[in-house]
Image (cartoon, grey):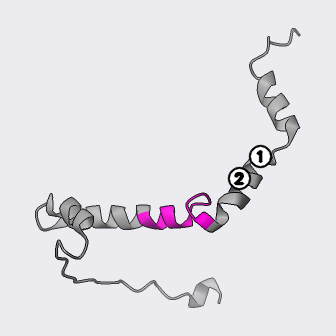
Amino acid sequence: MNAGTAMAPETIRLLFELERDDNPRLYDELIRFKKGTKRVNRLRTLAQEGLLAQHWPIGSAGKRGAAREEATACDQGDAAMTNQVFEQPIAE
């Protein structure tokens, strides 16, 4: 698909009902706002944060070990380079 034939993304419209019994924490968070833009924006923010948390490397139990290995597998040269930043300036 090239740029000339790319289709514009379709707008998604949602209408849903949420009772407190369904999800008390979400309900309590959203009910703080009056109907309208602020409530919709808060729901949008919560959805975005949920997606980020879901795809965060440490967020999933199955990937914790791999993320920990990746974090500890840094090159020792990186630390030396970082430490040089705090040394005395080089005289020219």
Q: Position of residue 29 (x, y in %)?
A: 22, 60
Horizontal side, residue 16 vs residue 67: left or right: left
Image side of residue 75 versus residue 86, left or right: right
- Under circle 2, the secondary element is helix
Is residue 74 rendered to the left or right of residue 6?
right
The numbered dot on residue 68 is 2
Span colored in magenta: 50-61
Residues at marks 2 and 1, CA–CA distance in whole angstroms? 6 Å
Three-letter amino acid code of the residue under disc 2 = Arg
> Percent x, y for residue 80?
84, 29
- Reply above or below: 16 against 84: below
SS assignment at label 1: helix
Q: Residues within 10 Å of mark 1 (few under 14, many from 20)?
A: few
Quarter residue 34 falls in:
bottom left
Q: Which residue is mark 1?
A: 72
User: Residue 64 in the image: x percent, y percent?
Assistant: 65, 59
Residue 38 appearing in the image: no
Residue for point 35% across, 63% down: 46
Q: How many marks?
A: 2
Are the residues at dot 2 and dot 1 in contact (C-beta closer than 8 Å)?
Answer: yes
Q: Is residue 61 above or below residue 5?
A: above
Nearer the observer, 47 or 2: 47
Image quadrant containing the C terminus: top right
Question: Is residue 55 inside the magenta stretch?
Answer: yes
Percent of width and height locating residue 73: 81, 48
Q: Residue furthest left?
A: 34
Q: Amino acid at mark 1?
A: Thr
Queried whether the magenta region covers residue 58, the answer comes back as yes
Q: Quadrant of the N terminus?
A: bottom right
Q: In the image, what residue occupies the spot 74% across and 18% down?
A: 86
Asked whether 86 or 29 is in front, the reply is 29
